[in-house]
Structure formats: structure tokens, C-alpha cells
Amino acid sequence: MSAREQSQSGAFSSASRSLFEAEEEETAAPGRCLSLLPWDRFSAWLHCVCVVGFDLELGQAVEVIYPQHSKLTDKEKTSICYLSFPDSNSGCLGDTQFCFRFRQSSSRRLSLHCMLDQLDRDLPVSLKKDSAYYYGYVYFRQVRDKTLKRGYFQKSLVLISKLPYIHLFHTVLRHIAPEYFVKNEPFLEAVCSDVDHWPPPVPGKTLNLPIMGIIMKVRIPTCHDKPGTTHIVQFTHEVDTQISIALPTVHEVDLFRCFCPVFFHIQMLWELVLLGEPVVVMAPSPSESSDTVLALVSCISPLKYCSDFRPYFTIHDSEFKEYTTRTQAPPSVILGVTNPFFAKTLQHWPHIVRIGEIKLPGEVPKQVKVKKLKNLKTLDSKPGVYTSYKPYLNRDEEIIKQLQKGVQQKRPAEAQSVILRRYFLELTQSFIIPLERYVASLMPLQKSISPWKSPPQLRQFSQEDFMKTLEKAGPQLTSGLKGDWIGLYRHFLKSPNFNGWFRTRRKEMTQKLEALHLEALCNEDLLFWSQKHTEVETVDLVLKLKNKLFQADREHLPMKPDTMEKLQMHIDTIILALPDDLQDILLKTGTT
């Protein structure tokens, strides 16, 4: 028996095997592109697992990549090496967890890509994977060891994934990393084998994920969930004897803890993130840096933050020169840094958030003024927000009072985070609803859709027309906040976040028009039409219908359930009415 087989048999109980088999049957949906191959289940969650150590001659080096067939370019390995260790000045003794994000060098397609793309479609827009980036989830250990020349044991266990499931992967690392540092590679092989038995990450389903003797119970959100609601993972009697951990979320960070150091500026930070402004987070360690950057990116949910963001960024990063040059304006990106060198290098950036060591306050935070950029000399400068930015909206004193009261009453941090997340959600929704309403009005009327003409085009987005709608149907309908909402919208319409949002909405609406056009075709008597036209015209119609059917299936157009079947029946009926030689050709003809 191979080591892989031994680890599988040792790590799995028969009960957890039955869980995995049941999941396999459920997810074997029709239309799956490829059957599952070895490591396909693993690849649905992780690209690989790396171990990064410190070599006295080479410096940081990737010691192990598992599974061994996993592909990483030299550039990707270098990125992982430098991003997996805290800067030396951080002084992180003991165990430290953090997250980083880096560019993928080249586009490599997984064997499971068809099913993953299908799963991705059902995710909220903020959780969809970005094909150009990987996440790295790190568990770093640094302890004194007199037997080593350097005097310290320094090693990181790193999970590389396309999925932004921060809380899930940090939980996995907390469970496996301490034991890995004792048992080494055989243990790592057993961990990967367990992950290769996980069901696919299907949004909306409660998933049971066995990992080294425990089972995590999780639910991945879907785009159909009501924003702001959390689906509690329910326990069931049949399998709960095995469930060790039920995770309340797979992706959320502790919002209140992250924003505590800049408590009075949360609304201004929301504006900066919404507008895609360049922001640097300077923190004492990668943990604080990565948590704060991820909290900032999440504060405009359900809008997707469409620019680049780096939870932990180092001077060795391949984009270091690109992001620190003074020859052009800073790019639309949020960087998390810990190296004091950045206090000088990024001094020209317009918005700098200085974070001290994050601790939940035992007393009410004192009022902190926005500081001038010229006062930021070093990374040791006092915590605060350094910027000359003047917010468009008046500050909401109510949320400040509510959270301050929570601190006084020792309200749990989780409850404070829920309040803060709901505040950000309501603010974002108040801002985006007028845009949604206006963009919906660009949709052509359904009566203008003719089965015998191409689908009509969406009307052009007009900034001035949109602005005119704000007087009667603006954010004042859902928000009591006063301020220059018009100015905020004008700024937003020039931002990457608007471009990303509008591209997505335009695509959705175009697909809806295509779907309505197909439904109109299905309601026609196509056989009668073909009998009144030449064979050449009929063959042309059949080929076009086949192509539309193929595209509808590939793009998962939002159609009524029976539309595809009706269209296929129309095609079959028309073909059967043609001469035998044409029937043979058309039945064999595929689609492009």
C-alpha cells in the first residue's frame, strides 16, 4: 500500500467516507464537463500546499510543494518565499497567521475548470475568484532553537488557493500546522489526502469537510442570499457525533477589531474604498496588515472591490517598482505593509492608514483627528489616518455612539462587528440602489423583442440623465445622511469599481435579452416557417438555432426551465421534415 493510500485509510472513518460519497452523487450534475480525476477534488479548493523555510545560504526557500505535480513558476515561488515570512523588524515570536495575494504568472487551467466556473457563477460577486491572482494563507512559526546555527526555528506552512475563504483556511491551518511542525511530510500528505475527499465548494449547500480527525461544517454563500443575512449552519442528529467545528462564515474577518484603531474614520475609509483611491495600511505585523486590508475591501460589500489589493506587500514583491514609483500617480490599489522603509517610499501616497497593535478596547476610544501627510515620518508615527481628503458625506454620529456604547457595556466583539457590517451594507445599498434603478431603465421593452430580428441593444449609460434621477429617486429615500451625494456619484463614475460593476450589470442584462429572444423563438411555429422557405434558408435557420442552443448552454442564460427542451424539439422537428441526405448532415453537424 502506498503512503497516499495509508494516509487515506488512516485519516478517514467509514462514516466520513459515506459523507463524501453522498456528496459525490449529489454534485454529479448533468452537463459536467469532465469526470473527476485524482486530485480534482483537492484542486477545487487548493492549488497546492507549500512549506517555506530559512536557509542560511539561500535565505527563504520553498522546501516542499504538495501535491508534487503542482505547477508553480520560479517567479511564483519567489513571491511565495518572500510573502510567507514576516519582515525581520516585525519581531513575530511564536505562531503568527496572516494572508497574502499575488499575481499568477501564467494562465493554467485546472482539469476541473468547467465545474469550477459553474460553481463560481452562483457566488456573490465579491467572492468570485479572480483568474489572475492567488491567495496565500500562512501559519508562521518562529521559536528559539539553540541546536540551529541561526538560533531560531523559522518555518511557514502555506495554503495556496484561488478562493478568498480567509476564515475557513485560517481555521484549517490552526488545526493542522502545530502538528505538522512535529510530524513533517507524512502528516502533510495525509492532510492533502483528506482535502482530496472534500465535496466540491458548492454555494448554498452545507458541506462537511473532514480534516485530520475532525469535520468542519460550512456553508458557502450564494448570489441569491439576501445581503447582510448569515445562514446559521444547523446541526443534524445523524452526523453530529462527528462534527467538531461549525464555522459561522468562510470569508469574513473580525470587522470591529480591524477598524478599532481608526474608529472615528470608518465612513471616510468607506468613501476611499468605494472610489478606488490608493490606500496604504502601515501595521506592525502581517496579521494586522492583512486583516485590515481585507476589512477595507469587504466594507463596500455587496459591491465588488475591482482594483488590486495586497493584504501583505514587501519590498521584494515583483510589483514593488510599479507601485512605488514617483514618476506617475499612485495606482488604484490597497497595500498592507510592515517594513519601515515604506514610510519613506510611499510618503507620496495620498491616503495612509497607520495601525498600531490591534487590541479590542477596554474603554471608549478617544476622538482622533485626521492627520496631515507631512506629519508621517516613520512607521513609528502615531496610529491614525494621514490624508488631505475631505469626505463628501457628513459623518454619521449615530454609528459612532452605538459602537462606543457597545464598548462601555462590554458588548461582544462579534456583536459589534455585526452592527458595523450592517451599517456598511446599508450605506452601500443606499448608494447603489439609484444606480441599479437607472441602469434597469436602459433595458428595452419586452414587446420590442422580435424572434426574426437580432435582440435589441441596451441604451447607452448617460451620466447627466442618471444625475437628473437623483432629485426624486436618490439615496435620500433610504439614508438620512446629508452631504454632497452628487459629488460622490460623479467621482464614483470615474472609478474602477463603477467600471467593474457596470460591466457585470451590462453582461447580465445582455444575457437576459438573449434569453428573452430565445423564448420568443420558442413560441413561434418554426416548422410552418420552414415549409414556406427554401431548403437553404431552412438549413441556415437550423444551424443558427443549434449555435444559439450551444451558446445558451455555455453561458447559462437565465431562461425558463423548458426553453432549451422546446428549442431542441423545434430543431429536431424541422430536420425530420427535410430530405434524408440533409437530415444526415444536420444531425451530424455540431456547433461552433
Image (cartoon, helix red, strand yellow):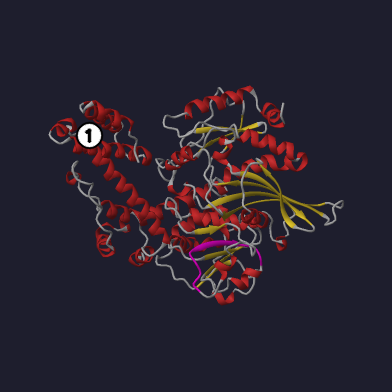
| Residue found at the far right of this picture | 147
Q: Nearer the viewer, residue 509 or 248?
A: 509
Q: Position of residue 43 (x, y in %)?
A: 57, 39
| Residue found at the far bottom of this picture | 374
Residue at position x 72%, y 61% from top?
88
What stretch of residues is rendered in magenta?
328-339
Q: Nearer the viewer, residue 75 or 170?
A: 75
Residue 559 is left or right of residue 104, and the answer is left
Q: Position of residue 52 (x, y in %)?
A: 71, 50
* Residue pointed to by mark 1: 522
> Quick check: 3 above or below 475?
above
Q: Quadrant of the N terminus?
A: top right
The answer to which quarter of the image holds residue 152 is bottom right
Q: Nearer the viewer, residue 219 or 59?
A: 59
The answer to which quarter of the image holds residue 187 is top right
| Residue type at tag 1 | Cys
Indicate the secondary structure of the residue bearing disc 1: helix
Q: Position of residue 397 (x, y in %)?
A: 45, 61
Residue 213 is left or right of residue 303, and the answer is right
Residue 380 visible, this angle: no
The answer to which quarter of the image holds residue 546 is top left
Residue at position x 62%, y 49% from top?
72
How many residues crowd around disc 1 within 10 Å: few (fewer than 14), some, or many (20 or more)?
Answer: many
Q: Quadrant of the C terminus?
A: top left
Residue at position x 69%, y 32% from top?
4
Residue 306 visible, this angle: yes
Residue 464 is left or right of residue 358, and the answer is left
> Quick check: 306 above or below 34?
below
Q: Is residue 338 magenta?
A: yes
> Quick check: 159 above or below 28?
below
